[in-house]
Image: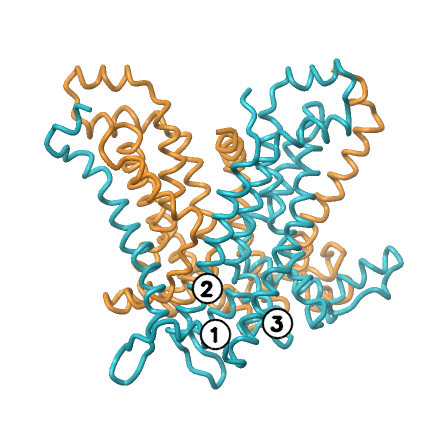
Chain colours: A cyan, B orange
Amino acid sequence: MAAATKPIRWHIVLFLAPAVLVYTVVMILPLFGTLQLSLFRGTPDGQVFVGFDNFRTLLGDPRWSASFWNALWNNVWFFIIHMLVQNPIGILLAALLSNPRLRLRGFYRTAIFIPTILSFVIVGFVWKLILSPIWGVAPDLLGMIGLKGLFAPWLGKEEYALTTLGLISVWQFVGIPMMLIYAALLAIPDEILEAAECDGITGMAQFWKIKLPLILPSIGIISVLTFVGNFNAFDLIYSSQGAMAGPNFSTDILGTFLYRTFFGFQLQIGDSNMGATIASMMFFIILAGVCLYLFAIQTRLRRYQF
Amino acid sequence: MSKARTSPWRSAAAHAVLIAYTAVALFPVLVIIINSFKTRQGIFRSPLSLPNAETFSLIGYETVLAQGDFFLYFQNSMIVTVVSLFCVLLFGAMAAFALAEYRFRGNSLMGLYLALGIMIPIRLGTVAILQLMVASGLVNTLTALILVYTAQGLPLAVFILSEFMRQVSDDLKNAGRIDGLSEYRIFFRLVLPLVRPAMATVAVFTMIPIWNDLWFPLILAPAEETKTITLGAQVFIGQFVTNWNAVLAALSLAILPVLILYLIFSRQLIRGITAGAVK
């Protein structure tokens, strides 16, 4: 390469400098700072290196580990709800919308995407009001279809609260898988579909046998985006249930657990080292999930070149 | 095209499913907006009916606007969003241009380094970010939020924009070089105007999470004079939780700006998602 022998080309440095600088100082260094902080313990004499003691406390001390496993399992359940409800609904809607002869496509697309642009604060409160037994919108609606007896204050019951919040989050984010799958379906060339029709594969069979295998890579990307988003979630739970993730911590996920640990709550004072430890655990969980996707799933998915 | 795909029964079924889901998506928002225009009795007696002469009332909006702080919160959100957006677009485009245009040692490594942030959320560094902001005296300033959001938006911006910049014709840039344009002029005069549609897409994607974020305003800038609208709404609703008129009005006021922006830019957003996903 001729470039290697030249002196430094300053314009490249100048073009890269602002982005790299801000990104490194505000994002990468704090990420490593957090990982580092999880290996220390604050004492009156300053920070003392304690190795993996914080992680041992988090996983071994019953007071910590109970909360941690509770938050982790709740988070896993939160993720499972998204995978089982959000993505199939998203695929179904996209499959319906991708029919080029469907009228009003633009309207449906725009309308179904609206919840996705709203902030968690709005979504959390809107659903809290609608599901509130005081107001009675939800019981009235159930009453219209004769199911009033089914109503329960879902957000207030330990056994339902997390599932309800998961479904609210699905309601908010279903637009994202819908759009990405929609885009993937539109990208399938017409020749392939016409060839399938010549072979007599139409309708549902065409979707299952031709389209679905072709959009699997997009489904993979959506799954990993959902994973990262869910294990990083905080706002919805905080704005509808508060930092205590009530009732009785039944909706506590890693994000709210991190917030409470870092800032303290009630009588417990905030602990930045334990907060960093929890953030590090989240980091490793997300990293493991992303690596699993990149190395185990993405390499096995067959990509079709058109 | 076969007849099976367009039979009337099939398309009626498709419409039925889509209408049902659209109703599910819009219903909660509509209920909130409709009820924000009612009196307290109207809200509770018949939550599902439209406001009529008897139940119409603007008392909720009066309560919210009398608080006065909402304009300040709104202004804070605007400043943070616009300045971060500007920095993300400018710095992101510059870095994307360097990565897409020049061959230098470490190019792909640099691309990978900048792309890391797409998968690893910046929130995980919060503990150290707060320490950094405390050390530099930026806590409770809008600058802290702008820095964080710029860093948060850059990875995706660089990734998308460099894909687009690779498509800009080399002949055009070389013609510019022959005419004696400097590399900076080539970037600002030739390339930037050509990738404007991609910039708009990145702008929409960057803007929504910044405007809606609760985590960083709560942690880095919770002071009264630096609250963003999202945090302000959260605190306000928490305080007025029993004043249903005020809560419903505050929610409607928080929904409206985003909704209007979305309806203006929805075509851009959808085109961006479809274009980005095809890549």
- Answer yes or no: do the residues labelled 2 and 1 have beta carbons within 8 Å? yes
- Marker count (numbered): 3
**Sequence order check, earlier mark of 2 and 1:** 1
Residue A40 occupies which quadrant of the picture?
A: bottom left
Q: Is residue B272 left or right of residue A19?
A: right
Residue at image x 39%, y 28%? Answer: B164
- Are the residues flagged by discs 2 and 3 from a single subunit? no
Question: Which residue position is annotated with label 2?
Answer: A281
- Answer yes or no: do the residues labelled 2 and 3 have beta carbons within 8 Å? no
The tag on residue B243 is 3
Q: Disc 2 sits on a residue from what chain? A: A
Kindly state the secondary structure of the residue where label 1 is placed: helix
Disc 1 residue type? Leu
Give the Cα distance between marks 2 and 1: 10 Å
Mark 3: give few (<14), some (14-19) or many (20+) Cα within 10 Å: few
- Answer yes or no: do the residues labelled 3 and 1 have beta carbons within 8 Å? no
Considering only vertical position in the picture, is A238 above or below B180? Answer: below
Residue at image x 64%, y 71%? Answer: A250
Question: Toward the viewer: A293 or A200?
Answer: A293
Question: Which residue position is annotated with label 1?
Answer: A58
- Are the residues flagged by discs 2 and 1 from a single subunit? yes
Residue B217 occupies which quadrant of the picture?
A: bottom left
Q: Is residue A99 left or right of residue A3?
A: right
Q: Residue furthest left?
A: A7
Spot occupied by residue B146 in the image (x, y as percentages of width and height):
33, 54
Q: Disc 1 sits on a residue from what chain? A: A
Disc 2 residue type? Met
